[in-house]
Image (tube, rainbow, N blue to C red):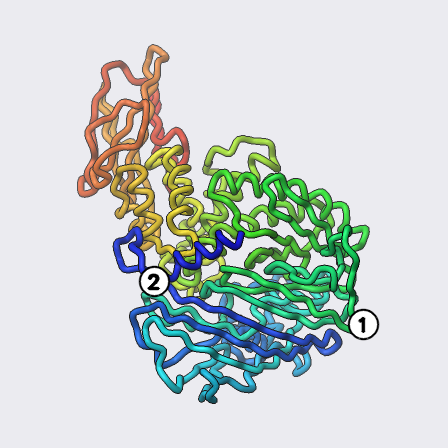
Amino acid sequence: MKKLFTFLIILTTIIVSSQNNTTYWQQHVDYKMDVDFNVEKYQYKGTQKLVYTNNSPDVLNKVFYHLYYNAFQPNSEMDARLQAVVDPDGRMINNIGTIENPTYESRIAKLKPDEIGYLKVLSLKQNGKNLKYTTEGTILEVTLNSPIQPGDKATFKMTFDGQLPVHIRRAGRNNEDGVALSVAQWYPKMAEYDFEGWHADPYIAREFYGVWGNFDVTLHIDRNYTVGGTGDLQNPQEIAHGYEDKTKPLNLPKGEKLAWHFIAENVHDFTWAADPNYTHDILITKSGTELHFLYKDTPEYSKSWKDVQPLTEKALDYYNSTIGQYPWKQYSVIQGGDGGMEYAMCTFIAGGKSLNEIVGTVFHEFAHTWFHNLLATNESKHSWMDEGFTTYISTLASNKIIRGRDDVPNANDYGDYYYVVNNRIEEPLTTHADRFNTNVAFSIGSYSKGSMFLTQLNYIIGEENVKKMLKKYFEDFKFKHPTPNDAKRVAEKISGLELDWYLNEWIETTHTIDYAIAKVEDKSITLARVGQMPMPIDIVVTYDDGGTENFNIPLRMMRGNKPTSATILKDWTWAHPTYTFSVEKKIKFIQIDPSGLMADIDKSNNTFEME
């Protein structure tokens, strides 16, 4: 494992050539943190040593840190947005009106001083010299004493205080399941700097982007609390709590607290949760990965959390075979948070009174590991690549493993997309995740339409090519922060087809697909492109004698066609709104797109039956 990570770190810090033929580089961080947590006050004190490597070609005069917990304060930007958006997240508000006439009140706005979250930087030095810095909401702006030159390193040493907020979103104290501590986005975190510049976005609501590196974290917490999260525990015999090697003697220290020492290599975040009433199970999978399960030791949760464990191993096997190998020693599924949320080497999952309540969420959040933690697109800018690709693959896994069906892509989840189109609230997927006008437009766009990018790609380039594309995309871009163009170029190279038009139309616009059978005269068929977005067309004709024939009409901009047994017709240009072809026998019935994978917004004009 060490050799693997050494290779990956070298790979990501040298200059290489990427898929889009630009010079590739990325920054690197090495964190060492020591944190003492007060479980009664939900407060903690920490020291942080951060070695920052500037692999960019640019001279850096400033750096920026995220202070995420400052969002959980009255009048923060998160609070302001929560009060302004027309469809606020139900977890973050109270309805002080009625169901019929709701009046929403921000939970953040009502937080008291001992309930808010905060991160306070008390001191900060660069290479031993004090730095000037200012806190602007959830961002720490730091002016450097000496610029960091390309290829150089700087060592930052910091002391900080933090307070875990009342649980409102993702992280906090005492969630609805009674989990004491769900601790995510909890430390001053260096912002990402890439080929686009700094990404010091304020924490408004969603999505994260981080610098890969190594974390060495020691957590001091009351000895009766069981901890789970990112990294590998280095001192299990001094901790126990289910981590110990039962063939070796324990060496438990005296005192009220234990010092949990974790190391995580080549991750872009560090997350943990703790509770005095956690059960801790470990499943050693056939692939060698340790699956850790930490959940409340109560009758209402125990059965479901036991039952989900073998299914989680099956999900691991599925993702390993369809995307690529999980590289770390362990993965932890932890009861905590709200709903589900993905983190490095772990996930928070709320609930579990029934298996159905959590199993789908576990499959989804686990799949995020490959897209959020190993590929790690900038999901603030391209949320559809993380959420959409995760939804696509976890749906296939769920269909096969949980529901006992096949894992062939289908259009069962297109309904949400049609909803935002029909209600005219859809927004382009180039919109920053925080800046969608509505939460519903973000959610359906990122999850549903993002997933449909791949589902429709099956229609455009063929199912086998999409399978190959996902594996090649992962192999080429793990640990590299790929862009939309990178994913598109992999699909082009696998299929041999031009797909720039598809990325543009489906992601960068809100153009819709609508094709119609415009006219049938004897054996002549005329099709019309009613919508703005062009597509290749699959069409099946049923003849009067009962026979059928499938046709494929390539889109000229594709410069080719997918693998198909259908009869290939002359290509159709985008500029021509109609297309006519003839068949050799008498027509009885015609259908556009019999697979249903093309997201045609009006199916009523997709069929024709001869009277």
The vertical placement of 543 against 348, above or below, is: above
Taking the view exactly as shown, the residue that stands out farthest to the top is: 545
The location of residue 264, given as percent across then percent down, is: 56, 61
Identified by mark 1, the residue type is: Lys
Please report the residue visible at 52 percent of the width from the left and 42 percent of the height from the top: 319
In the displayed structure image, the side of residue 533 where residue 225 appears, left or right: right
Does residue 116 lie above or below 324 as drawn? below
The quarter of the picture where residue 295 lies is bottom right
Query: Which comes sooner in the sequence, label 1 or label 2?
Result: 2
> Which numbered circle lies on residue 25?
2
Q: Residues within 10 Å of mark 1 (few under 14, many from 20)?
A: few
At 49% from the left and 53% from the top, the residue drawn is: 3
* Residue drawn at (42%, 44%) of the image: 452
Q: Amino acid at mark 2?
A: Trp
Q: Position of residue 283 (x, y in %)?
A: 68, 45
Report helix, strand or loop for mark 2. loop
The label on residue 254 is 1
Q: Give the number of marks.
A: 2
Q: Is residue 527 above or below residue 439?
A: above
Residue 248 position within the rendered picture, expressed as x and y whole percent measured from the top left: 77, 54
- Can see residue 550? yes
Residue 611 appears in the figure: no
- Badge 2 crowding class, 10 Å Cα cut-off, few under 14, some 14 to 19, many 20 or more, is many
Q: Disc 1 to disc 2, how far (Cα)? A: 47 Å
User: Residue 413, percent across and down?
Assistant: 49, 42
Mark 1: which secondary structure?
loop
Q: Quadrant of residue 554?
A: top left
Decide if residue 523 is on the left or right side of residue 414. left
In front: 438, or 147?
147
- Point out the frontmost of discs 1 and 2: 1
The quadrant the C terminus occupies is top left
